[in-house]
Image: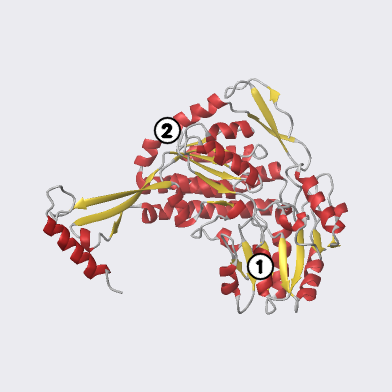
Amino acid sequence: MTAVQPKPTAHSVGETFDSLSPATDEVVGTYPVHSKEDVRAAIARAKDAAEWWAGLGYDGRAERLRRWKGVITRRLPQLCQVVRDETGKPIADAQLESVLAIEHIAWAGKHARKILGKQRRAAGLMMSNQAATVEYQPLGVVGVIGPWNYPVFTPLGSIAYALAAGNTVVFKPSEYTPGVGKWLVDAFNEVVPEWPVLQLITGFGETGASLVTGGVDKIAFTGSTGTGKKIMAAAAETLTPVIIEAGGKDAVLVDADADLEAAADATVWGAFSNSGQTCIGVERVYVHERVHDEFVAKVVEKSKDVRAGSDAAAQYGPVTMPSQLSVIKRHIADAIERGGKALVGGVDAVGDRYVQPTVLVDVPEDSAAVQEETFGPTVTIAKVRDMDEAVAKANDTKYGLGSTVFSKSRGIELAGRLRTGMTAINAPLSFAGIASLPFGGVGDSGFGRIHGPEGLREFARPKAVARQRFTAPIVLTSFSRKEKTDALVAKLITVLHGKR
């Protein structure tokens, strides 16, 4: 990314920045660095639009979301090209994340009423004269700070659900992918031209910080754990709630009865696709000793056919953020210096833009390559005595985002023992493509959920209502209450709840 260059714009105090292709350094777009005042103005516009958008109701919002996904679907090749221009990933990978995002838009719009609409609740015997209901109301304005690695799929997992719940959204994409963010917002504004329901702000960390402190009703952030902590600290000043989807150090467990061909294929794809720049990507594998050697051989063989590059035959593209190259190289070097072996790749696999696949074995568990998020096309494979040891080692991390288990007989059991927000059994990362499943982690991977019913509820506040249907024969909430009433209540509660 080039340094900020002063240029007059209609949207900011004058600064702009260039979005560059990570494959060629070609300038693919120039965008304003929105100031604190710009951000506050956008939030103010969003507040003005919030009543109108919420007033459309579930059906009205669902109709606009259907039209939005239609625009995205019909112009999918165009969107995929913008993603490729700014991230360097192959068109097929850009299409995959966009297709999944379209599915999430569809699910959120279709299910919002069922999940968030008014529901009856049991009032209980003591309050049987009351009718109890709960519904979920919009928060108001949601600020979404998106990442660059999946610039369509990930932010839309927040944006679509926030919109379906009745909120307006101010969206700051990563400074590495502002063009993707603009494309998505422009497409939405074609089908919602009346009010600024979804707005774009662009810039660097200062712009994102202004969004956090600018008066939004909730922040949804995807990015590094360190930045997530800073956002939480800033949001705490105004008690602004946050959703944090941070990093991961996801593990694959391969049991003795696993389909090794499928497990190896999933490992290679999960570790190397998108240049390893996947928060739920495969970074560690723990394999039962009885099948370890055969599994490693399959992974090595499959890895030899995978190559990074910008040509049509390459399976993945460049590392999008240049500073990540030194992290990847440090992790590989540390692993080898500590006694690990690179069966594929190694330190020399890290180039100026591209990192070729690296498969590491015999790496100490306390090394950087095992404990820290690498976010590159590398994977460590370790032999374990049994799945108890595999679970213990997989859980021995500060992260807890996704995980995968390959086992014919114990998949569900092992999945339940893993300290992660999500687990796929006998298939790679499948939970991300199922719109009804919540997405999120624990520990340093963050908290809160996007996707599914839980994702819709994250962007709404529960409103409880109790309505008296008739006057109760025993009035408890009055100073005119008699002693015999208290005695009767004590006797009643003993009958109901005092049994041993």
Q: Amino acid at mark 2?
A: Lys
Camera-side residue of 95 and 159: 159
Q: Is residue 431 visible?
A: yes
Q: How many labels, in total?
A: 2
Compared with residue 454, is residue 257 higher up or lower down, i.e. above or below? below
Camera-side residue of 327 and 18: 327
User: In the image, residue 226 lies at what x, y percent?
Assistant: 64, 43
Q: Quadrant of the N terminus?
A: top right
Residue indicated by mark 2:
47
Q: Is residue 63 visible?
A: no
The residues tagged by marks 2 and 1 sit, at their Cα atoms, a distance apart of 48 Å
- Per the image, label 1 sits on a secondary structure element best described as helix
Camera-side residue of 456 and 337: 337
Q: Which mark is residue 392?
A: 1
User: In the image, residue 442 lies at what x, y percent?
Assistant: 57, 55
* C-beta proximity under 8 Å, tags 2 and 1: no
- Left or right of 162, for residue 118: left
Q: Quadrant of the C terminus?
A: bottom left
- Left or right of 277, for residue 357: right
* Residue 486, picture quadrant: bottom left
- Left or right of 415, for residue 462: left
Residue shown at 80%/48% (left/top)?
Answer: 354
- Per the image, label 2 sits on a secondary structure element best described as helix
Q: Residues within 10 Å of mark 1 (few under 14, many from 20)?
A: few
- Left or right of 465, for residue 415: right
User: In the image, residue 488 lies at what x, y percent?
Assistant: 15, 62
Camera-side residue of 210 and 59: 210
User: In the image, residue 371 lies at what x, y percent?
Assistant: 72, 56
Q: Earlier in the sequence, mark 2 or mark 1?
A: 2
Q: Which mark is residue 214?
A: none
Q: Nearer the viewer, mark 2 or mark 1?
A: 1
